[in-house]
Amino acid sequence: MPRLFGFSIDDQQQKPPSVVAPVPKTNEDGVDNYIASGFYGQYVDIEGVYRTEYDLMKRYREMVLHPEADSAVEDVVNEAIVSDLYDSPVEIELSNVNASDKLKDKIREEFKYIKEMMDFDKKAHEIFRNWYVDGRLYYLKVIDTKKPEDGIQEVRYIDPMKMKFIRKEKKKDQNENIVSNRAVDIRQAVYPDIEEYYLYTPKPNFPTQFFSSGSPASGKGGIQIAKDSICYVTSGLFDRNKGTCLSYLHKAIKSLNQLRMVEDSLVIYRLSRAPERRIFYIDVGNLPKVKAEQYLRDVMMRYRNKLVYDANTGEMRDDKKFMSMMEDFWLPRREGGRGTEITTLPGGQNLGEITDINYFQKKLYRSLNVPETRIAGSDAGFSLGRSSEILRDEVKFSKFVGRMRKRFTHLFNDILRTQLLLKNVVTPEDWDIMSDHIQYDFLYDNHFAELKDSELLQERLNLAGAAEPYVGKYYSADYIRRKVLRQTDQEIIDQDKQIKQEIAKGIIPDPNAPVDPATGQPIPQTNGVLGKNTLEPEVEEEKSEAPETPSGGEI
């Protein structure tokens, strides 16, 4: 067995031996619990659908080479990752974290450092697309083993085809359990110690035997890497029956294959039925069969004039030796018939019908959770009017992109956790409490969200204006702010503070100041003395300083 490579961050607060459970951890990471013998049977043959995860990811990558599938995937990725000239695609949001400002600044600094290591601002589109297509993402966290307090030095991308997460029972000493039955702890027998690590195979030459006997899973061809050394992010979709992590493209496999077959059959049909064919009825009279066939061939070669255009030389030449795919029909006709006759067989009449193609295109987009209106050349364009005019599919698509962003942020959480723990910025216990409140703000350019927010704000302001005559009579001002304008407690405090500052600076007038009934303008503030405004004390101070200006010898 190769030596375990990488590093591990141990939890200081280990659970006591008495805290055990007969049920193992869930396989949300796409791996099941295995026995110590190293049997990986469910990856060897899975009902003939896909033999290994290698084959599954290979199929996903072949799917996006199809133009329609690639267009749908690009719509999803462009919606999730917005590239801007000046702003970063994602920023960390720590407003809900209960920590000091110094600690928050340190976390923001480390997050910026992580993005620079990954070159995320430039490669965000490629990183998200790889994760979306493969359904999983692996990154190796490289550190200086002699100076781990320096944090992560490099983050390297690993091809998912070369990595696998392994979870199996730890091997025990044979003499360990040779005791009486009473001495054996039943809890240890039900829930044994589980070993977790990653297996890296540089050259998976035999993907169908990726987890068979004597394969890299048995430790003879792969490199074991510690769990904390790898950042592993899945799509969140799992086949519970087969215990396999899936991609968002998995639902579209059948619809894409159907679209391909329908398109190929359409091309074949049009090539064979599009041209018109002629039928030549040649009168052979009373000639014998052999002579009649010879006469028919002579007539066919005499009148069959095949003119070919040479694009290289620009010449026209007669090419009788080549047989075309769409040959005319030459039929003999005996004496007593209507003589020599030429008729024409019409070509296909329904060549313009592509209803089935459009159906399978829409089915492909629906299977990828992309609105049908985003199909290239669709008559139903995206409306930039009121949000009520926007289709329900756009609302569902916006929520789908939001869920994918939430899942993708596990990448940042994992790397940021390792970085903060190595640099002793936070403790593992503090991180467990803090990580639930850390959010990531993605750059957003969805017009639907902007229209929805502006329309909601407009409706709330109109409702607040209609309720203004009843403030102080039936409703309080606080009730209007909370129930109508939907302001939170923190927003009310912040807005009141900003309003006071702007009134003090003279940016906005004081609504409580007395108003001149004649002009309707606010009356200037005084110091309590009639005819003396607030500027007079400053004038007196300037006059008091005037005698100090002259120097000695002046009058």
Image (cartoon, rainbow, N blue to C red):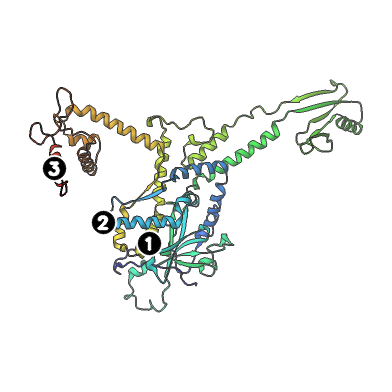
User: Residue visible at 27% across and 28% down?
Assistant: 462
Neighbours of disc 1 within 10 Å: few (<14), some (14-19), many (20+): many
> Residue flagged by tag 3: what amino acid is it?
Glu
Nearer the camera: disc 2 or disc 3:
3
SS category of the residue bearing label 1: helix
User: Label for residue 419?
Assistant: 1
Q: Earlier in the sequence, mark 2 or mark 1?
A: 2
Q: Position of residue 541 (x, y in %)?
A: 13, 42
| Quarter location, residue 68 | top right
Answer with the quarter of the image where residue 472 lies. top left
Eye-nearest disc, 3 or 1: 3
Q: Residue at x 34, y 74 (%)?
A: 184
**Of the pair 79 and 300, the residue shown nearer to us:** 79
* Residue in the foreground of this view, choosing between 88 and 408: 88
Can you identify the residue that label 3 sits on?
Answer: 541
Left or right, residue 163 beside residue 328:
left
How far separated are the C-alphas under marks 2 and 3? 44 Å
What is the three-letter code of the residue carrying label 2? Ser
**Labels 2 and 3: the sequence-earlier one:** 2
Residue kind at label 1, given as amino acid type: Gln
Can the viewer see residue 509 in this picture?
Answer: yes
**Disc assigned to residue 100:** 2
Residue drawn at (48%, 39%) of the image: 366
SS type, badge 3:
helix
